């Protein structure tokens, strides 16, 4: 297992069609936050092709490559016909005619699964937290975006101390709850479930070790920030793991 996984480049391979407002069937629309939501998409299905997202037959995001988060699009707060389209094959890999959106809510939509599996390509729509943590704190959510890692534990360690915050049992293709922590820098270790020996120096049991090694800076967090960290398979179909760049949910 490669501990010194490189970050998947951010922003390569996605052509964002702009911040779009998806209209209701009669063609009316509104930019009011009381009637709209925000949506971004992350393709974390290792075997999935480059995909397009269509809402009510309109292309919102195109050429969504593996491991490359989109920016946000604005969507009306109703149920929408929601499709993931494979332009190379000319087929829909997912078609949900009643995908619900709630006004004033922000979502991160994960493309998960595998075409070769019994369930195929699926979606997991996460609700982002836009509420502030207590004064001096930030919030962090960790997503296990790997279909092969199984449940993982996450350890956040204040550098130079023995202070450890643990997030346990994050199943594949699911997210932890947001954790409220004191602002500052944290070494982040991700290991397979119940392998707390990951905290030893240069541990073999770590799937990902974000602590300044291999040119990666120790992540720092400021008060008032909400962030999402996604672990993924480093190479489509491969057996090593890495994390995407930290996603900003607030501030």
Image: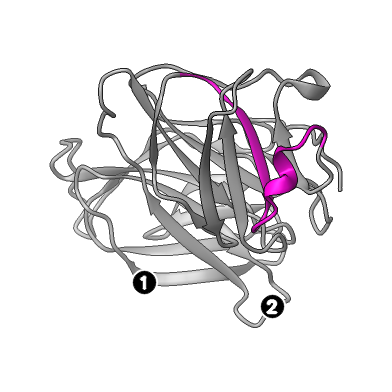
**For residue 148, which quarter of the picture?**
bottom right
Identify the element where label 1 is drawn. Answer: strand
| In-front residue for pair 211/39 | 211
Left or right relative to 216: residue 109: left
Q: Which residue bears the numbered disc 1?
A: 97
Q: Is residue 188 magenta?
A: yes
Residue 216: percent from left, percent from top = 73, 21
Identify the element where label 2 is drawn. Answer: loop
Q: Which residue bears the numbered disc 2?
A: 117
Residue 92: percent from left, percent from top = 57, 69
**For residue 139, which quarter of the picture?**
top left
Image point 54% across, 68% down: which residue? 122
For the C terminus, give its image quadrant: top left
| In-front residue for pair 127/161 | 161
Q: From this view, report whether residue 25 is shown above or below residue 198.
A: below
Q: Is residue 15 magenta?
A: no
In the rendered structure, are the residues bearing label 1 and label 2 in contact, judged by CB atoms less than 8 Å apart? no
Residue sticking out furthest to the front: 162
Q: From this view, report whether residue 91 is shown above or below residue 167.
A: below
Image point 65% across, 57% down: which residue? 194
Label 1 packing within 10 angstroms: few (<14), some (14-19), many (20+) = few
| Residue 141 appearing in the image | yes
């Amino acid at each position: 297992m490669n501990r010194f996984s490189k970050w998947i480049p951010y922003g390569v391979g996605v052509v964002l069609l702009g911040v779009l407002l998806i209209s209701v069937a009669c063609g009316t629309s509104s930019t009011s936050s009381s009637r709209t939501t925000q949506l971004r998409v992350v393709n974390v299905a290792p075997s999935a092709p480059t995909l397009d997202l269509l809402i009510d037959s309109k292309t919102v995001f195109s050429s969504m490559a593996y491991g490359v988060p989109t920016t946000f699009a604005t969507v009306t707060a109703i149920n929408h016909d929601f499709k993931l389209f494979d332009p190379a094959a000319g087929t829909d890999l997912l078609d949900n005619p009643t995908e619900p959106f709630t006004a004033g809510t922000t979502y991160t939509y994960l493309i998960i699964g595998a075409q070769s599996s019994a369930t195929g390509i699926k979606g997991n729509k996460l609700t982002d937290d836009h509420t502030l943590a207590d004064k001096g704190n930030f919030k962090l959510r960790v997503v296990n975006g790997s279909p092969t890692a199984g449940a993982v534990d996450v350890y956040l360690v204040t550098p130079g101390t023995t202070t450890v915050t643990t997030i346990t049992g994050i199943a594949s293709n699911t997210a932890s709850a947001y954790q409220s922590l004191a602002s500052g820098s944290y070494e982040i270790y991700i290991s397979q479930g119940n392998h707390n020996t990951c905290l030893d120096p240069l541990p073999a049991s770590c799937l990902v070790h974000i602590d300044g090694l291999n040119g990666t800076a120790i992540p720092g967090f400021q008060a008032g920030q909400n962030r999402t960290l996604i672990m993924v398979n480093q190479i489509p179909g491969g057996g090593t793991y890495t994390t995407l760049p930290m996603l900003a949910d607030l501030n």
